[in-house]
Image: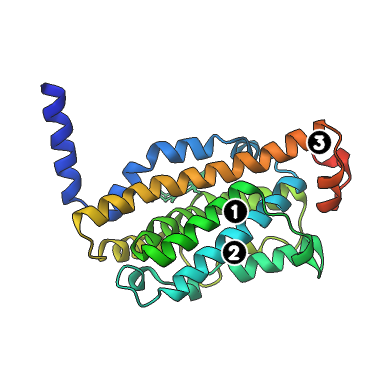
Protein backbone atom coordinates (compact mmCIF):
# COMPACT_ATOMS: atom_id res chain seq x y z
CA UNK A 1 0.00 0.00 0.00
CA UNK A 2 2.70 2.38 1.13
CA UNK A 3 4.87 1.55 -1.92
CA UNK A 4 1.88 2.00 -4.18
CA UNK A 5 1.21 5.45 -2.77
CA UNK A 6 4.87 6.43 -3.11
CA UNK A 7 5.01 5.29 -6.75
CA UNK A 8 1.90 7.22 -7.57
CA UNK A 9 3.23 10.37 -5.94
CA UNK A 10 6.46 10.13 -7.92
CA UNK A 11 4.52 9.68 -11.15
CA UNK A 12 2.29 12.63 -10.30
CA UNK A 13 5.30 14.79 -9.57
CA UNK A 14 6.83 13.79 -12.89
CA UNK A 15 3.90 15.17 -14.86
CA UNK A 16 4.55 18.61 -13.37
CA UNK A 17 8.14 18.71 -14.39
CA UNK A 18 9.97 19.81 -17.48
CA UNK A 19 10.52 17.45 -20.38
CA UNK A 20 14.28 18.03 -20.11
CA UNK A 21 14.25 16.91 -16.46
CA UNK A 22 12.00 13.96 -17.10
CA UNK A 23 14.01 12.73 -20.05
CA UNK A 24 17.23 12.93 -18.05
CA UNK A 25 15.61 11.03 -15.20
CA UNK A 26 14.10 8.22 -17.28
CA UNK A 27 17.33 7.66 -19.22
CA UNK A 28 19.66 7.79 -16.23
CA UNK A 29 19.99 4.04 -15.92
CA UNK A 30 20.37 3.66 -19.71
CA UNK A 31 23.15 6.25 -19.64
CA UNK A 32 25.05 4.17 -17.11
CA UNK A 33 24.58 1.10 -19.32
CA UNK A 34 25.79 3.04 -22.37
CA UNK A 35 28.87 4.20 -20.45
CA UNK A 36 29.58 0.58 -19.57
CA UNK A 37 29.57 -0.85 -23.09
CA UNK A 38 32.93 -2.26 -24.11
CA UNK A 39 33.43 0.54 -26.62
CA UNK A 40 32.77 3.30 -24.08
CA UNK A 41 34.92 1.52 -21.49
CA UNK A 42 37.78 1.50 -24.02
CA UNK A 43 37.26 5.22 -24.29
CA UNK A 44 37.26 5.72 -20.55
CA UNK A 45 40.52 3.77 -20.31
CA UNK A 46 41.90 6.18 -22.92
CA UNK A 47 42.58 3.38 -25.38
CA UNK A 48 40.36 3.61 -28.41
CA UNK A 49 41.76 1.82 -31.47
CA UNK A 50 41.75 2.97 -35.07
CA UNK A 51 39.49 0.03 -35.98
CA UNK A 52 36.95 0.97 -33.29
CA UNK A 53 36.89 4.60 -34.35
CA UNK A 54 36.66 3.85 -38.07
CA UNK A 55 33.73 1.49 -37.53
CA UNK A 56 32.07 3.95 -35.15
CA UNK A 57 32.28 6.66 -37.82
CA UNK A 58 30.50 4.36 -40.30
CA UNK A 59 27.65 3.83 -37.86
CA UNK A 60 27.46 7.51 -36.96
CA UNK A 61 27.20 8.34 -40.67
CA UNK A 62 24.17 6.11 -41.12
CA UNK A 63 22.55 7.36 -37.89
CA UNK A 64 23.03 11.09 -38.50
CA UNK A 65 22.04 10.81 -42.13
CA UNK A 66 18.68 9.41 -41.05
CA UNK A 67 18.28 11.73 -38.04
CA UNK A 68 19.16 14.91 -39.91
CA UNK A 69 17.14 14.07 -43.01
CA UNK A 70 14.10 13.48 -40.81
CA UNK A 71 14.70 16.65 -38.78
CA UNK A 72 15.08 18.65 -42.02
CA UNK A 73 11.93 17.19 -43.53
CA UNK A 74 9.96 17.92 -40.34
CA UNK A 75 11.59 21.24 -39.47
CA UNK A 76 8.23 23.07 -39.45
CA UNK A 77 6.53 20.51 -37.25
CA UNK A 78 5.61 22.16 -33.90
CA UNK A 79 7.48 19.49 -31.93
CA UNK A 80 10.59 19.79 -34.09
CA UNK A 81 10.88 23.53 -34.90
CA UNK A 82 11.94 24.59 -31.34
CA UNK A 83 14.82 22.07 -31.27
CA UNK A 84 15.88 22.46 -34.91
CA UNK A 85 19.46 23.81 -34.87
CA UNK A 86 21.13 22.65 -38.08
CA UNK A 87 23.71 25.47 -38.16
CA UNK A 88 24.90 24.65 -34.65
CA UNK A 89 24.50 20.89 -34.49
CA UNK A 90 24.46 19.19 -37.92
CA UNK A 91 26.96 16.30 -37.86
CA UNK A 92 26.57 14.71 -41.27
CA UNK A 93 29.10 16.87 -43.12
CA UNK A 94 31.76 16.65 -40.38
CA UNK A 95 31.35 12.85 -40.37
CA UNK A 96 31.71 12.74 -44.16
CA UNK A 97 34.92 14.70 -43.84
CA UNK A 98 36.26 12.26 -41.24
CA UNK A 99 35.27 9.27 -43.37
CA UNK A 100 37.13 10.75 -46.32
CA UNK A 101 40.17 11.27 -44.12
CA UNK A 102 40.24 7.64 -42.99
CA UNK A 103 38.82 5.73 -45.99
CA UNK A 104 39.86 7.97 -48.88
CA UNK A 105 37.82 9.67 -51.60
CA UNK A 106 35.87 6.51 -52.42
CA UNK A 107 34.74 6.15 -48.80
CA UNK A 108 31.10 5.73 -49.89
CA UNK A 109 31.96 2.40 -51.51
CA UNK A 110 34.13 1.30 -48.63
CA UNK A 111 32.12 1.87 -45.49
CA UNK A 112 30.29 -0.93 -43.64
CA UNK A 113 26.95 -0.46 -41.92
CA UNK A 114 26.42 -3.11 -39.22
CA UNK A 115 22.95 -4.63 -38.66
CA UNK A 116 22.17 -2.86 -35.35
CA UNK A 117 22.98 0.46 -36.99
CA UNK A 118 20.53 -0.29 -39.81
CA UNK A 119 17.83 -1.05 -37.25
CA UNK A 120 18.48 2.31 -35.55
CA UNK A 121 18.33 4.30 -38.80
CA UNK A 122 15.21 2.41 -39.83
CA UNK A 123 13.50 3.46 -36.60
CA UNK A 124 14.54 7.09 -37.16
CA UNK A 125 13.04 7.09 -40.63
CA UNK A 126 9.89 5.43 -39.41
CA UNK A 127 9.24 7.98 -36.66
CA UNK A 128 10.15 10.82 -39.02
CA UNK A 129 7.26 9.65 -41.17
CA UNK A 130 4.78 8.50 -38.56
CA UNK A 131 5.54 10.34 -35.30
CA UNK A 132 7.78 13.38 -35.84
CA UNK A 133 7.06 14.43 -32.24
CA UNK A 134 9.32 11.54 -31.12
CA UNK A 135 12.33 12.96 -32.97
CA UNK A 136 13.18 15.16 -29.99
CA UNK A 137 13.97 12.00 -27.99
CA UNK A 138 16.60 10.93 -30.52
CA UNK A 139 17.97 14.42 -31.14
CA UNK A 140 18.37 14.87 -27.36
CA UNK A 141 20.14 11.52 -26.93
CA UNK A 142 22.64 12.12 -29.69
CA UNK A 143 23.29 15.88 -29.68
CA UNK A 144 23.28 16.49 -25.94
CA UNK A 145 25.49 13.42 -25.55
CA UNK A 146 27.88 14.78 -28.18
CA UNK A 147 28.00 18.11 -26.34
CA UNK A 148 28.59 16.41 -22.97
CA UNK A 149 30.77 13.29 -22.62
CA UNK A 150 31.39 13.49 -26.38
CA UNK A 151 33.83 16.34 -25.89
CA UNK A 152 36.04 14.16 -23.72
CA UNK A 153 35.77 11.33 -26.26
CA UNK A 154 37.16 13.66 -28.92
CA UNK A 155 40.27 14.40 -26.87
CA UNK A 156 40.78 10.69 -26.14
CA UNK A 157 40.44 9.82 -29.85
CA UNK A 158 42.99 12.47 -30.73
CA UNK A 159 45.46 11.22 -28.13
CA UNK A 160 44.97 7.47 -28.65
CA UNK A 161 45.30 7.70 -32.42
CA UNK A 162 47.88 10.49 -32.49
CA UNK A 163 45.78 12.59 -34.87
CA UNK A 164 47.19 15.97 -35.82
CA UNK A 165 45.49 19.32 -36.51
CA UNK A 166 42.02 17.98 -35.81
CA UNK A 167 42.22 15.66 -38.86
CA UNK A 168 39.62 12.92 -38.66
CA UNK A 169 38.07 14.56 -35.60
CA UNK A 170 35.52 16.90 -37.18
CA UNK A 171 32.68 14.89 -35.66
CA UNK A 172 33.59 16.10 -32.18
CA UNK A 173 33.97 19.75 -33.12
CA UNK A 174 31.03 22.18 -32.97
CA UNK A 175 32.28 25.49 -34.39
CA UNK A 176 28.77 26.96 -34.17
CA UNK A 177 28.57 26.31 -30.41
CA UNK A 178 30.85 28.56 -28.40
CA UNK A 179 29.75 27.30 -25.00
CA UNK A 180 28.41 23.71 -24.89
CA UNK A 181 26.97 24.31 -21.41
CA UNK A 182 25.07 27.43 -22.41
CA UNK A 183 23.88 25.77 -25.59
CA UNK A 184 22.63 22.76 -23.63
CA UNK A 185 20.66 25.14 -21.40
CA UNK A 186 19.08 26.75 -24.43
CA UNK A 187 18.32 23.33 -25.94
CA UNK A 188 16.67 22.16 -22.71
CA UNK A 189 14.50 25.30 -22.55
CA UNK A 190 13.45 24.72 -26.16
CA UNK A 191 12.59 21.11 -25.36
CA UNK A 192 10.48 22.36 -22.48
CA UNK A 193 8.56 24.71 -24.76
CA UNK A 194 7.24 21.84 -26.91
CA UNK A 195 3.55 21.31 -26.30
CA UNK A 196 2.72 17.65 -25.87
CA UNK A 197 -0.34 15.81 -24.63
CA UNK A 198 0.22 13.55 -21.65
CA UNK A 199 0.17 10.53 -23.92
CA UNK A 200 2.65 12.05 -26.38
CA UNK A 201 4.95 13.06 -23.53
CA UNK A 202 5.00 9.53 -22.16
CA UNK A 203 5.73 8.19 -25.64
CA UNK A 204 8.60 10.65 -26.07
CA UNK A 205 10.06 9.47 -22.75
CA UNK A 206 9.73 5.84 -23.83
CA UNK A 207 11.36 6.72 -27.14
CA UNK A 208 14.32 8.29 -25.34
CA UNK A 209 14.95 5.05 -23.44
CA UNK A 210 14.69 3.27 -26.78
CA UNK A 211 17.15 5.73 -28.34
CA UNK A 212 19.74 4.86 -25.70
CA UNK A 213 19.01 1.17 -26.26
CA UNK A 214 19.66 1.58 -29.99
CA UNK A 215 22.97 3.25 -29.25
CA UNK A 216 23.98 0.49 -26.83
CA UNK A 217 23.16 -2.11 -29.47
CA UNK A 218 25.16 -0.22 -32.09
CA UNK A 219 28.21 -0.18 -29.79
CA UNK A 220 27.82 -3.86 -28.82
CA UNK A 221 27.38 -4.90 -32.43
CA UNK A 222 30.45 -2.97 -33.50
CA UNK A 223 32.56 -4.51 -30.75
CA UNK A 224 31.24 -8.00 -31.48
CA UNK A 225 32.29 -7.58 -35.10
CA UNK A 226 35.77 -6.56 -34.07
CA UNK A 227 36.18 -9.27 -31.42
CA UNK A 228 34.83 -12.25 -33.33
CA UNK A 229 36.12 -11.49 -36.82
CA UNK A 230 39.58 -10.98 -35.46
CA UNK A 231 39.89 -13.92 -33.13
CA UNK A 232 38.62 -16.08 -36.01
CA UNK A 233 41.38 -14.76 -38.20
CA UNK A 234 38.92 -13.32 -40.73
CA UNK A 235 40.79 -10.66 -42.67
CA UNK A 236 37.77 -9.28 -44.58
CA UNK A 237 37.01 -6.68 -41.94
CA UNK A 238 40.68 -5.73 -41.69
CA UNK A 239 40.67 -5.20 -45.46
CA UNK A 240 37.50 -3.12 -45.33
CA UNK A 241 38.98 -0.99 -42.58
CA UNK A 242 42.30 -0.85 -44.47
CA UNK A 243 44.08 -1.85 -41.29
CA UNK A 244 46.49 -4.77 -40.73
CA UNK A 245 44.66 -7.58 -38.83
CA UNK A 246 47.21 -7.28 -36.02
CA UNK A 247 46.11 -3.71 -35.34
CA UNK A 248 42.43 -4.40 -34.89
CA UNK A 249 42.21 -6.12 -31.51
C1 LIG B 1 25.45 13.87 -20.32
C2 LIG B 1 29.55 11.43 -19.66
C3 LIG B 1 28.31 8.29 -23.08
C4 LIG B 1 24.20 10.72 -23.80
C5 LIG B 1 26.66 13.47 -19.85
C6 LIG B 1 27.37 14.13 -18.79
C7 LIG B 1 28.53 13.47 -18.62
C8 LIG B 1 28.55 12.37 -19.55
C9 LIG B 1 29.64 13.79 -17.61
C10 LIG B 1 26.87 15.31 -17.97
C11 LIG B 1 27.28 16.61 -18.52
C12 LIG B 1 26.51 17.74 -17.86
O1 LIG B 1 25.70 17.52 -16.95
O2 LIG B 1 26.72 18.86 -18.29
C13 LIG B 1 29.56 10.38 -20.53
C14 LIG B 1 30.65 9.43 -20.65
C15 LIG B 1 30.30 8.54 -21.62
C16 LIG B 1 28.99 8.94 -22.10
C17 LIG B 1 31.92 9.47 -19.82
C18 LIG B 1 31.05 7.37 -22.15
C19 LIG B 1 32.33 7.21 -22.11
C20 LIG B 1 27.09 8.67 -23.57
C21 LIG B 1 26.38 8.00 -24.62
C22 LIG B 1 25.22 8.68 -24.81
C23 LIG B 1 25.21 9.79 -23.89
C24 LIG B 1 26.88 6.76 -25.34
C25 LIG B 1 24.11 8.42 -25.79
C26 LIG B 1 24.23 7.82 -26.93
C27 LIG B 1 24.19 11.78 -22.92
C28 LIG B 1 23.13 12.76 -22.85
C29 LIG B 1 23.49 13.68 -21.88
C30 LIG B 1 24.77 13.23 -21.34
C31 LIG B 1 21.88 12.79 -23.70
C32 LIG B 1 22.72 14.91 -21.44
C33 LIG B 1 21.99 14.64 -20.15
C34 LIG B 1 21.13 15.83 -19.75
O3 LIG B 1 21.72 16.81 -19.33
O4 LIG B 1 19.92 15.74 -19.86
N1 LIG B 1 27.39 12.39 -20.28
N2 LIG B 1 28.58 10.05 -21.42
N3 LIG B 1 26.35 9.74 -23.14
N4 LIG B 1 25.15 12.09 -22.01
FE1 LIG B 1 26.82 11.04 -21.68
Q: Is residue 7 above or below residue 245?
A: above
| Secondary structure state at the residue bearing disc 3 | helix
**3 or 2: mark nearer the eye:** 3
Q: Is residue 96 left or right of residue 164?
A: left
Asked whether mark 3 lies closer than 8 Å to ligand 1, one says no
* The one of 41 and 208 positioned closer to us in this rendering: 208
Disc 1 residue crowd, few under 14, some 14–19, many 20+, Cα 10 Å? some
**2 or 1: mark nearer the eye:** 1
The residue depicted at 63 percent of the width and 41 percent of the height is: 221
Q: Is residue 219 above or below residue 77?
A: above
Displayed quadrant of residue 184: bottom left
Query: Mark 2 highlights which residue?
Result: 173
Q: Say which mark, if any, is on residue 118.
A: 1
Is residue 182 visible in this depiction of the protein? no
Instruction: Kindly report the distance in space between the C-alpha atoms of the residues bearing marks 2 and 1.
Output: 25 Å
Q: Is residue 81 left or right of residue 57?
A: left
The residue depicted at 64 percent of the width and 36 percent of the height is: 45
The residue depicted at 11 percent of the width and 29 percent of the height is: 5
**1 or 3: mark nearer the eye:** 1
Is residue 27 visible in this depiction of the protein? yes
Q: Position of residue 124 (x, y in %)?
A: 48, 59
| Secondary structure state at the residue bearing disc 1 | helix
Q: Is residue 77 above or below residue 9?
A: below
Displayed quadrant of residue 1: top left
Q: Say which mark, if any, is on residue 77.
A: none
| Sequence-earlier tag: 2 or 1 | 1
Query: Mark 3 highlights which residue?
Result: 230
Amino acid sequence: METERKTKTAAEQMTDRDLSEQIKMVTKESHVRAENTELMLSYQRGQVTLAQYKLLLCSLYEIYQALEEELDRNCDHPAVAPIYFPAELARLEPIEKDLEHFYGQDWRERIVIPAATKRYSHRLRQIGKENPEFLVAHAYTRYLGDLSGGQVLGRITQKSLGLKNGEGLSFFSFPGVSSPNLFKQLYRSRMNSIELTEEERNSVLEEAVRAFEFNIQVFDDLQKMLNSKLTNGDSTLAKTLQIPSSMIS
